[in-house]
Image (cartoon, helix red, strand yellow):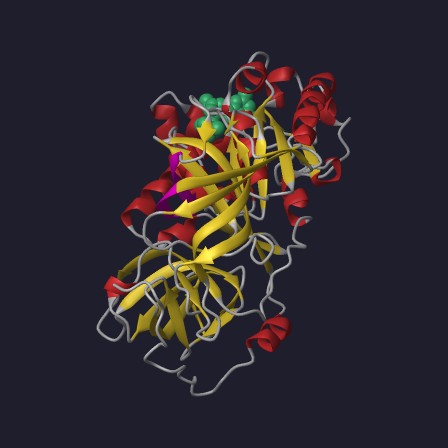
Amino acid sequence: KSLSIQEPAVKASQPKQKINVVEKFISSHRKAHVNFVVVGHVDAGKSTLMGRLLYDVGAIDERTIQKYKRDANNMGKGSFAFAWVLDQSKEERERGVTMDVAMNSFESSKVAFTILDAPGHKDFVPNMIAGASEADFAVLVIDSSPNAFEAGFVQSGQTKEHALLVRSLGVQRIIVAVNKVDNVNWSEFRFDEVKEILLAFLSAAGFSESQTTFIPCSGLCGDNIVNRSGRAELSWYKGNTLLEELENLTTVERDIGAPLRMSVTDVFKGNASSAVNITGRINAGNIQVGETVLAIPSNETATIKSITIADQPNDWAVAGDNVQVALSNIDIVHLRAGDILCAISSPVKCAQTFSARVIVFQLRIPLIKGSNILIYRGRTTEAARILRLTALLDKSTGKVTKHKPRHLVSGQSAIVELEVMGSSFPMETFKASKDLGRVVLRQEGITVAAGIVEEILSVKNETM
Ligand code: GDP
């Protein structure tokens, strides 16, 4: 298939009754919708914490949790009941694509949340990349138990890698759940100790102190997750619960009037009247039933037959929504996970070469000009090559410390130029789109660097 983009054969179809979606959205007073990713060392208590959160906000019914508790007790693993809430949904997700969105969503009285790629897997990092590249903010779960914190953080645990990864992907806001404080007698001293060490690390990694919050909590006992702890031993803590802190973060700005960008997460066959069903997330702009949209990179148009948000049919949807959409007038071969649906008048570019600002992780061998790598964003991946090492940067100020370094080693921050070798990788600069302007670089199954797209230097779909 030719890479150059032709004029789409079909012109935009007009919906029968065109809706002003922006006005609709404003007058609907719909709850803000935010996505977050949960990161931290294995066994820090991520699954338990999220299970508890879902249970305490009423997203899981009593019968289900009682069943988990019975099953867990029977297996002699009583404490795992809450963790199973998420493990279960993981299973559900593997069986049916539509569950992906519904199962990990919950609402408080103020905000609708989606937990991205909820943990529960040991092989967590690849999933987390998909999650982190769509996250509005991150919850970092720390096991404060004696030795556990030291193992997960001070030594070579995953805590640091995860924190660096979300930061390098442009996530600025982080909530640190200092978990399992039941194991340290609810000690303020231990909390302060953990906080001090983490704060130093997080600020060196580029998280500003004002964007970082620490909450002493216990996912297992349920203290300070949704309900404020009533324990005398924890009365020294006057701050927010985890849920209150999550609700505080909803000033995420989304451009619902901008040209459409929707990242496709799954594609599956539709029924007779619609050729294809897709799930995905609207990154910018809005959609409505009857409208024609453009799929990139195939450059094929499709008509929106129906829209479903959290199992409810809707005439329209806006940036921030996770949706299922039935499309007609398109063949399923023209769509795949990782594609971007766009406004016909404003297709997204597919970069041939681009520059990125990245942080380098653990490397076995230094990265040099010519190194082959894979670039990832969400579920999209493509072969690429390092064209140029442009500059080394100071990690906290972002200023150039050296031009044209010979190689990059672990821990450095740099500007690099990359060439996309495979077919097409739709992207935008991070400035234009926080969602579509993030990339993760991997080699042989290891994350070697992650960062944000600074500039698109040349494009494959040139005629756009
Ligand atoms: P994940 O790997 O980070 O998802 O961790 P899990 O949620 O699976 O929990 C790992 C282990 O820590 C399990 O045995 C949990 O029961 C236990 N755990 C989780 N949260 C707490 C907590 O708040 N306090 C205590 N004491 N144990 C916890």
Does residue 13 sit above or below 315 in this rendering? below
Does residue 210 sit above or below 317 in this rendering? above
Answer with left or right where residue 392 lies relative to residue 296: right
Task: Point out residue 252 in the picture as x, y percentages from the top left corner.
Answer: 64, 55
Q: Looking at the figure, which quarter contains the C terminus?
A: bottom left
Task: Point out residue 256 in the picture as x, y percentages from the top left corner.
Answer: 58, 67
Answer with left or right where residue 130 lies relative to residue 193: left
Quadrant in which residue 27 is drawn? bottom right
Task: Point out residue 324 in the picture as x, y percentages from the top left corner.
Answer: 39, 63
Report the front residue among 236 and 138.
138
The answer to whether residue 377 is magenta is: yes
Residue at 71% in and 18% down: 193
Report the front residue among 423 and 177.
423
Residue at 66% in and 16% down: 185
Answer with left or right where residue 247 lies relative to residue 440: right
Q: Looking at the figure, which quarter contains the N terminus?
A: bottom left
Q: What stretch is highlighted in magenta?
A: 371-384
Main SS of the magenta part reads strand
Does residue 33 sit above or below 93 in this rendering? below
Q: Can residue 435 be seen in this view?
A: no
Answer with left or right where residue 270 lies relative to residue 372: left
Quadrant in which residue 205 is drawn? top right
The answer to whether residue 114 is magenta is: no
Task: Point out residue 202 in the picture as x, y percentages from the top left corner.
Answer: 66, 30
